[in-house]
Amino acid sequence: MEEKKSPLLRTVDKVKPPYPLNKFPKDFGFKLGREIVYLLTTKGKPSLEGPEWEEIFALCIGAEWKPSNVGLDDVVMETCAWGAKTVKSSNPVNAKKIRLISGRNSPVFSFGEKDPLSLNTEELGSQIISIWNERVYGVRKAFKHLRTVVLVKSTNLDVVAVFEFETITYDSDKYNWIWNTNKNLEAHDKANGEHRFTWQPHGSQFTMIEDIPPGRLIVQIKPPPKLDKESILKGIGFKKDWITVFQKND
């Protein structure tokens, strides 16, 4: 059977994104590195999680950070929105694939299923994918362009890779749905057999497996020196009267 073609959409073509996919603004890499150095200096530990990455990415491209319950439009610039994800890797420079936790897709909540595990795998997979698709449809009503930006980070944040991909919907019929040995549901592409999604019945966590595209942006960071606590307090002019201590007995 011939595969259906996607229609061209004039409204989308006329509204250009802020920049081409994966062609970040000229000074983006430097700004990102600078923010990571500041974070390492002030935190004292190599920790950069989701909300911080959302805010940093928005700052580096001049967009607005608007944390979203959906998680697909946390960063906004004109007619474009991004969901921002972080994932650890032992080798961000050469990693080929990553796993992205992409929300909780619950057939119990969304479809009123009392026992989802009693469904055949194809029907259950269809429900799981349709939950994701509805989220995407909802955000696309407000934005002409929708992307996911991923920060692949080393354990100590001395090197990171950044890339984007279009946030799209999926056709559940293009995948074989099977239970793995851990009793999680997996989706494998019928065309090439590649593992693309995993769904965990306990907690309904939905994971997407993405290929990292060529042309990822690599930022290497020289770890900054650790700041001395007493020097910091002295530098900001700390005074004893900044602190009030009392005991409340009633």
Image (tube, rainbow, N blue to C red):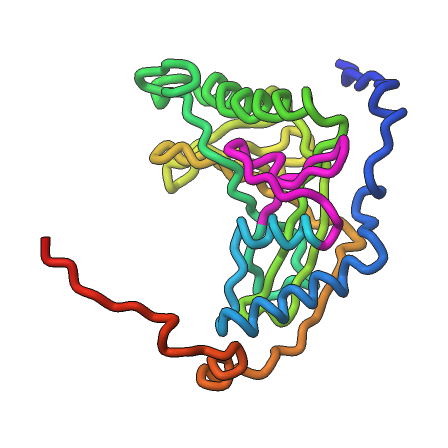
Q: Is residue 224 visible from the viewing direction of this image? A: yes
173 vs 200: above or below: above
Residue at left 53%, top 67%? 155
Please give the count of numbered marks on the rendered protein.
0
Residue at left 62%, top 57%? 152
Spot occupied by residue 50 in the image (x, y as percentages of width and height): 53, 50
Front one among 31 and 96: 31
158 vs 232: above or below: above
Spot occupied by residue 232 in the image (x, y as percentages of width and height): 50, 80
85 vs 179: above or below: below
Front one among 41 and 150: 41
Residue placed farthest to the front in the image? 241
Spot occupied by residue 55 in the image (x, y as percentages of width and height): 61, 50
Residue at left 83%, top 24%? 12
Displayed quadrant of residue 143: top right
Residue placed farthest to the left in the image? 250
Q: Is residue 137 shown left or right of residue 177?
A: right
Displayed quadrant of residue 156: bottom right
Q: Is residue 174 visible from the viewing direction of this image? A: no
The quarter of the rendered structure image containing the N terminus is: top right
- Residue 198 located within the stretch drawn in magenta: no
Q: Is residue 238 shown left or right of residue 42?
A: left
- Residue 65 located within the stretch drawn in magenta: yes
The part of the chain drawn in magenta is 60-85
